[in-house]
Amino acid sequence: MKMLYCKDCGEFRPEEDFSSNVNSKTGFAFYCKKHAALRQKNWKKENAVKVKAAKKDYYRRKKNSE
Ligand SMILES: [Zn+2]
């Protein structure tokens, strides 16, 4: 069985623990399914904060320009 390295695990894991990723050199995701899901979750969380902050900024600027 092919083993792939997960940066977040810090160790090699079996291929079946990875989703496929056509953009990667190996053809598999850079992180195992568990960590890929975790990263996705964190990204969404971070992004939600950013979007919220951007919206706030937009309304503030709009208000100031009026
Ligand atoms: Zn992992």
Image (cartoon, rainbow, N blue to C red):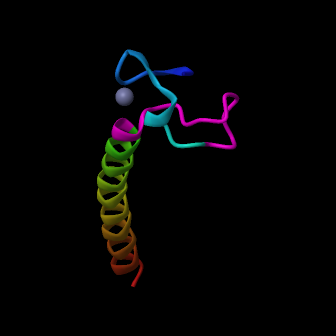
Nearest the camera: 26 or 1?
1
Total numbered labels: 0
Q: Is 57 above or below relative to 37?
A: below
Dominant secondary structure of the magenta stretch? Answer: loop
Report whether 13 appears left or right of 38: right
Farthest residue, direction front: 1
Q: Residue at x 31, y 65 (%)?
A: 52
Q: Which quadrant holds the N terminus? A: top right
Q: Residue at x 69, y 43 (%)?
A: 22
Farthest residue, direction bottom: 66
Residue 36 in picture, x, y percent from top left: 41, 41
Residue 66 in picture, x, y percent from top left: 39, 85
Q: Residue at x 32, y 51 (%)?
A: 41
Residue 38 in picture, x, y percent from top left: 31, 43
Which of the 4 image quadrants contains residue 50? bottom left
Which of the 4 image quadrants contains residue 12? top left
Nearest the camera: 39 or 64?
39
Instruction: Give the magenta-colored segment's residue range.
Output: 21-35
Q: Is 64 above or below relative to 37?
A: below
Nearest the camera: 28 or 57?
28
- Magenta segment includes 24: yes
Q: Residue at x 34, y 80 (%)?
A: 63
Residue 57 in picture, x, y percent from top left: 35, 65
- Where does ligand 1 appear, by image quarter? top left
- Magenta segment includes 38: no
Report whether 49 appears left or right of 23: left
